[in-house]
Image: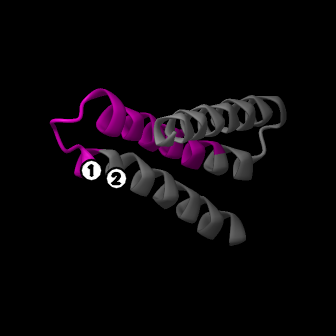
Amino acid sequence: MAELVYVLCAITSTTCAVLLSRSFLATHNRLLLWTALCFVGLAANNVLLVVDLVLVTDVDLSTVRIVPAVAGFAALVYGLVTEAE
């Protein structure tokens, strides 16, 4: 059951990243860009979570899968700070 939740989270975050990217390309709103980049990082994190916990169980990928999430959040924070000025 946990594997199903991991896969659904990966699908959901990937769908959000695609929809936000399409919306940014249509409107060129900079906040949508930073949010899309954040969700790209979160989607990569969720895909790596599925790979780590479901597909490759003998190798610990926890440090590798944290990097895209931190990069995504860093992009969002950077975007929020620069857009506020």
Badge 2 element: helix
Residue nearer the viewer, 13 or 26: 13
Q: Which residues are magenta?
A: 36-64
Residue at the disc numbered 1: 62
Looking at the picture, the colour scheme in use is one colour
What's the distance in space between the residues labelled 2 and 1, CA to CA? 6 Å
Task: Identify the residue at image location x=72%, y=46%.
Answer: 32
At label 1, counting other C-alpha atoms closer than 10 Å, the crowd grade (few under 14, some 14-19, many 20 or more) is: few
Task: Identify the residue at image location x=43%, y=43%.
Answer: 45
**Which amino acid does the dot numbered 2 rest on?**
Ile
State the image coordinates of residue 29 (x, y, percent, origin top left).
78, 45
Q: Is residue 71 above or below residue 21?
A: below
Badge 1 element: helix
Could you say which disc has been placed on residue 48 in the image? none
Where residue 27 sits, quadrant-wise, is top right
Residue at the disc numbered 2: 66
Residue nearer the viewer, 46 or 17: 46
Where residue 77 sits, quadrant-wise, is bottom right
Residue contact at pointers 2 and 1, CB within 8 angstroms: yes
- Please tell me whether mark 2 or mark 1 is closer to you in this view: 1
The quarter of the image holding the C terminus is bottom right
Task: Identify the residue at image location x=61%, y=65%.
Answer: 82
Residue nearer the viewer, 18 or 34: 18
**Which amino acid does the dot numbered 1 rest on?**
Ser
